[in-house]
Image (cartoon, helix red, strand yellow):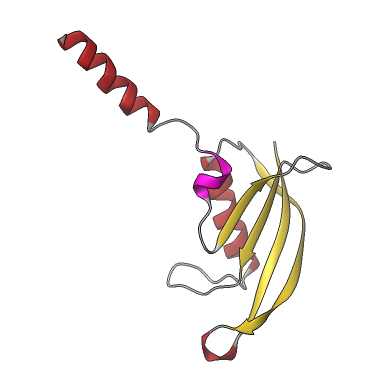
């Protein structure tokens, strides 16, 4: 019995190290979706929100956050293929327009 419990405990610990799915690394600022068409592996939707940690309007911040999220789903060397911006209705606080950045990424 103790061996079985130890084995179960070890399995639970190792499951925390497993790669996550694309939906598990998404939140209300960034959505990571598998792309099954074209030459891209992932489609990323990024809101231009501004927080204490990043600014969604800055390309370097979008790339940095997206690369870290893609690496957590098992993408070894993510590289952005293309990106486009689309304005949305409404504004953020202080009158900033809402923008969604769509980007396609390939894993190396």
x, y percent for residue 12: 32, 26
Closer to us: 63 or 100: 100
The residue at the far bottom in this view is: 94
How many numbered discs, if any?
A: 0
Magenta residues, as a range?
Answer: 21-25
32 to the left or right of 108? left
Task: Name the residue rendered at 57%, 43% in the picture.
Answer: 22
67 to the left or right of 85? left
Task: Name the residue rendered at 50%, 38% in the picture.
Answer: 20
Q: Is residue 100 above or below residue 6?
A: below
Q: Is residue 56 above or below residue 71?
A: below
Magenta part, dominant SS: helix
Quarter of the image where the N terminus is located: top left
7 to the left or right of 70? left
Quarter of the image where the C terminus is located: top right
x, y percent for residue 26: 53, 53
Q: Is residue 54 above or below residue 30?
A: below
x, y percent for residue 68: 53, 49
Closer to us: 4 or 62: 4
x, y percent for residue 99: 67, 74
The residue at the far left in this view is: 2
Q: Is residue 11 above or below residue 34?
A: above
16 to the left or right of 10? right
Residue 75 in magenta? Answer: no
The residue at the far right in this view is: 38
Task: Name the residue rendered at 56%, 83% in the picture.
Answer: 92
Task: Name the residue rendered at 31%, 28% in the picture.
Answer: 13
């Amino acid at each position: 019995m103790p061996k079985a419990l130890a084995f179960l405990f070890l399995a639970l610990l190792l499951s925390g190290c497993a790669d996550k799915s694309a939906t598990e690394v998404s939140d209300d600022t960034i959505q990571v979706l598998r792309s099954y068409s074209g030459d891209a592996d992932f489609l990323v939707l990024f809101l231009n929100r501004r927080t204490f940690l990043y600014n969604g309007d800055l390309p370097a911040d979008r790339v940095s956050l997206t690369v870290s999220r893609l690496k957590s789903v098992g993408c070894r060397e993510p590289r952005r293929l293309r990106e486009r911006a689309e304005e949305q209705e409404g504004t953020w606080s202080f009158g900033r327009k809402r923008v969604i950045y769509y980007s396609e990424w390939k894993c190396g």
